[in-house]
Amino acid sequence: MSIVKYKKTAPRDAPLSETTFIGWLQKNLFSSWVNTILTIISLYIVYAVVKSLWFWGIQDAVWVAENRRECFAISKHGACWAGVLIWLDNIFYGRFPRDELWRVNLGGLLLVLWMAPLWLPRVKDKIFIGLSTVFLYPFLAGYLFAGGDKGIFMQVMVSGAIVCLAGNTLHSILGVMSGRGLPEVLIGILRKENASDGNQRNTLLVILAVAYVIAYALQTSWSVMAVPWSKWGGMHLTLVISGIGITSALPGGIVLALGRRSRLPVIRVLSVSFIEIFRSVPLITVLFMATTMFPLFMPEGFVLNKLVQVIIAVCLFSACYMAETVRAGLQAIPKGQYEAAHTIGLGYWGMMSLIVMPQALKHMIPNIVGSFIGLLKDTTLVSIIGLFDLLGMLRAISQDIPWRGLHHEPLIFGAALYFVVCFVMSKYSRHLEVKLSAGGER
Amino acid sequence: MKLNFILTVAAIVAISFAGATTTKAKTTLEIVKERGHLRCQVGPASPGFYNLDAKGEWYGSDVSVCQAVAAAIFGSKKKLEIQSVSSQVRFTALANGESDMLSRTATWTLLRDTQLGLDFTAVNFYDGQGFMVPKDSGITSAMDLKGATVCVLTGTTTELNLADFSRANNLNIKPVTFEDSNVRNDTYLQGGCDALTNDKSGLASNKAAFPNPGDHTVLPETISKEPLAPAVRQGDAQWFDIVKWTVYTLINAEEHGITKANVDKMRSTSTNASVRRMLGVEGNLNEGLGLSKDWAYNIIKEVGNYGEIYEAYMGGGKLGIGIGRSGSANDLWTRGGLMYSPPFR
Amino acid sequence: MAIDDSGKTATLKPKAKFDFFHDERVRSTAYQILTACVVGWSAWYLITNTAHNLEVRGMNTGFGFLTATAGFDTDFKLIEYKPGVGTYGRIFLIGCINTLLVSFLAIILSTVLGFAVGVLRLSSNWLVARLALAYVEVVRNTPLLLQIIFWYVGVFALLPRVKNSLDLSAGAEVAFLNNRGLYAAWPVLDDMFWMTIFAFFVAVAGVLLLRRWAHRRQDETGKQFPVLAASIALLIVFPYLVYLASGSTLNWDVPKLQGFNFAGGAALPPAFLALLVALVSYHAAHLAEAVRAGILSVDKGQTEAALAIGLRPNKANSLIIIPQAMRAIVPPMISLWMNVVKNSSLAIAIGYSDVVALFMQTALNQAGYAVEMVGMTMAFYMFISLSISGVLNIYNKRVQLEER
């Protein structure tokens, strides 16, 4: 019998190819002949592109000038960013009166404020907050942007929106600080924890009614100057059209998708043909149809302004795409869920709203964000029918007499703007995708 | 549940109708007065005629005509809403009531006057189509363009005129159409086509925007007549007269030497009967139009006369595109041009 | 003890009380009738309004304009047309053909490029993978309209002027590239050429049969047959032999510089080239993402097993991975192909005369028959899109998993 002695040898260092930068280079970039050639070609492409962009866009560029001739005088081959910078207000706000820009900014700020709780960790009832954004925020923002006299309907909705915003903010602050929701805190303050459910609910409703009356009284005396829709433009108009498109696409898409899956033949046929018609034609034909044919569809004396026509067209179009997204989401729910819902006695609408839709929404959200990005890019088409959206404004710079002919720089600026917005949103959607499926993957 | 559903549907219907406005059968003047401002339609942007400046305000000679009509009705050129409509839908937007008048370099043609539901009022600019070529191409006349490629903007009479001209003279011109004038100009500058065709006013403004304007020349031939006039909906005679006579006021004011600066003085001290009638001191010319006595006075006070507008936007003014006026069709009839207003009596 | 059930079980007869409002058949029929009535009434309302408005405004209706002559010309047409002689119907046909031409080429090229970039995204070369990522992200996040304009302006910056045309055939002077377009010699066919064309179609059928036979042979014996090489040989050699045997001659229409432009031969305008490049790059980026997702959806075990049995990486890809990845790739590819056709309508921005630019813009401005023209254009796009989705859905069914 021989005794085998174990002598521990010191662990050796990792090979150079794993630890040093040169090793990394060799493994990743130069591992084979093909890779080496590809790397060299890629490096050359990167160098050429970056060099020309740097020289044209930054090194030789003119940042301050009075008009284009001056730009040429200062630097013949550089970019003339001066025109874009002077037109920045037009690009972002369109022709909105410069004294009233605070309204647009406030509208954007309110949206951020309203939707911020969706990201905060300890806030409850996120679905309610999300839905209230979709249904109530448009009225408040719409009034801020359009102004003028408020009709009864507008007053009601604006007060509701104010109450909702105040409630949401309080609720989120309470949630972040103490982990409890606003209803809980209110019940606690009024010492009704031990009261019956009905009693608690009524108390909350009374508080809500009081708040609503206060808000209504406050807003009757508040009004802002009317700004006609023809003054809306630029990035603001693009966001308005896409925003309205997406928010109305969701309920419309759900209705169409449910119709498509319906067992009733008439409804199914109508839904399928509606969806297929709008999905198989380009958006530009739908826009043309809206602007040339909608006025003919209306009875005499009934006038729809151009913005409403475009928004209706965009809503119809995006509802059909959303219908397909919803359908994919519904198909991802196992059949067992439908069957179980029927077993416990839920009717069609009960099953849809309580069991199926909440699960389906989880699958749909990344696609919805993707649709919104697509819609944002597609709204550049409205410039072809004459609305001064972001692209229309960028093109108008080249017609302004001091800046005649300046059209490359605005377009590049526009492309960069779109890229930043869309890239951020698509990164967020990918993050959402990972987060939402994290529980589901084994 | 059912009540919820019905309420939701009713709400949706109500919301969707919120964007619409109903109008009863009133005259256009009544509608405009009730609304409180004039709605005037221009196009995307055309240097000299209607442009957007960095502050978001419109300026140009067609915009001035809109301002004049607003001044005639309300006394102030600020009671004006300018809508920019693309060329595809410009005529339908007027026909269905979205705007009250169209002031946007629309050429007055038989087909448009009769088949599109609108009427052209009074010509405020006589233009013609021409060609521009690089100086070093050696082309000196439009007849040299045999087999040439010509850049043209789509959706306008320019395309048709080019085709007619090519056919009439057997030139076999190949058109390259564009929707964006900048892309068209770029193509021309890079040599993608041999010539550029556009109304001569447009050619002048395009040329001034090129990096080296001196390298390009406008060919002498004018191959079409392009009388540009504001248009209104068919069927409202009073409104038609108002817009028409607003344009004539501008021309007549220049003929009588009334300017923005001296209109007050002219009103109080002039002894010319025509001037006194026009400015409302005598007579009742305003009654047939349904406007106030000061209607013409307001026009000139707010906007100026035709010559001032031309100088500011088409001529050598700071915002002008630099077209000469003397000897052209746009000069007053007393100097040999075609700007002629019927008498104010 | 057995339980005696004879005749004593009380049969439960359900009390069939016909509750009118809760009976499913009644309700479903009622809903359908209600929907049909609402839709029908709305349609009738819209149609009567339209007719009334058209009449009141003095605008013309009817399809008679299709036989009226059109006064304008277009620069790119594949069929005969003369302004003042050609009709609006012919204009519509020209537009449709132009759209189909650019869409067809864009679909083929973008599919090829999309697969290539999708595979490159997963390359082991860090720089190449990052560059592919940058390309996909930039192209997907900027609007297509801006990209089309950029390519168009860029094409002009790169291409030479007419006088300095690039001779693509290196001296033989049969193909030229300049910023007026791509000019190439085009064959002039004489009468006997139809036989060669017929032979070409026979060769195509032969290639398909060859593929079926080669697959069956591989399934049975495991031996592989060089199908690609044999197909190419068949497609070229067989028609050529027929061509020689039929004694027809092939004349070429060579482009020559006359005056301002090249005359003769076939010409593709730069707007077409720019549109093609823009569509291809945009849709290839989208397809690359779908391809990447599809390849990633295939279990990693498949790659490992394929490498373990000795397949080279590229063979492993083409024989094992990609056929399985197609399951996840084909559905987005269907909508991608439809999008190519729809996005070709953006040709209007750079002046390529597709059906939207030519018929719905130019012709509509001149003739004014808004409802009919928009309707015809939409019908055309619907027909094309539904055909594409129909054909591809057949292919999709073949690659999908059979689910119980």
Image: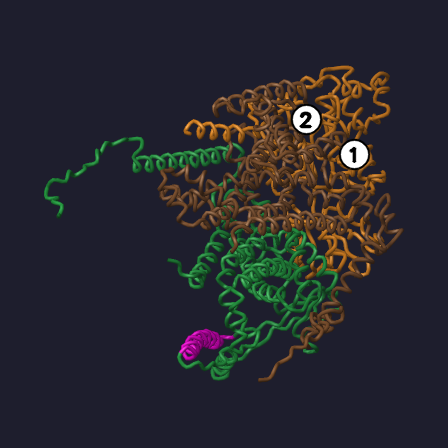
Chain colours: A brown, B orange, C green
Name the residue: 75% across, 18% down.
Answer: B294
- Answer few, some or many: residues within 10 Å of disc 1's Cα (few below 14, many 20 plus, some between 14 and 19): some
User: Which chain does tag 1 point to?
Assistant: B
Please state the horizontal and vertical placement of residue C297, each as a whole percent of the image.
53, 61
Residue at disc 2, secondary structure: loop
Please state the horizontal and vertical placement of residue C327, each as a whole percent of the image.
48, 62
Q: Nearer the viewer, residue A206 or A378?
A: A206
Please state the horizontal and vertical placement of residue B338, each as a whole percent of the image.
76, 36
Q: Quadrant of residue B117?
A: top right
User: Magenta residues, as a range?
Assistant: C190-219
Residue at disc 1, secondary structure: helix
Is residue B99 visible in this depiction of the protein?
A: no
Spatial distance from mark 1 to mark 2, Cα to Cα? Answer: 44 Å
- Split into 4 quadrants, where in the image is the N terminus of chain A? bottom right
Identify the amino acid type marked 2.
Ala
Q: Nearer the viewer, residue A357 or A97?
A: A357
Foreground disc of the pair 1, 2:
2
Please state the horizontal and vertical placement of residue A50, each as a whole percent of the image.
78, 60
Q: Nearer the viewer, residue A222 or A81?
A: A222
Name the residue: 60% across, 66% down.
Answer: C119
Name the residue beneath numbered marker 1: B333
Do pointers 1 and 2 mark residues of a single chain? no
User: Which chain does tag 2 point to?
Assistant: A
Is residue C331 visible in this depiction of the protein?
A: yes
Count all numbered tags in the image, as a single digit.
Answer: 2
Q: Quadrant of residue B37?
A: top right
Q: Nearer the viewer, residue C350 or B261?
A: C350
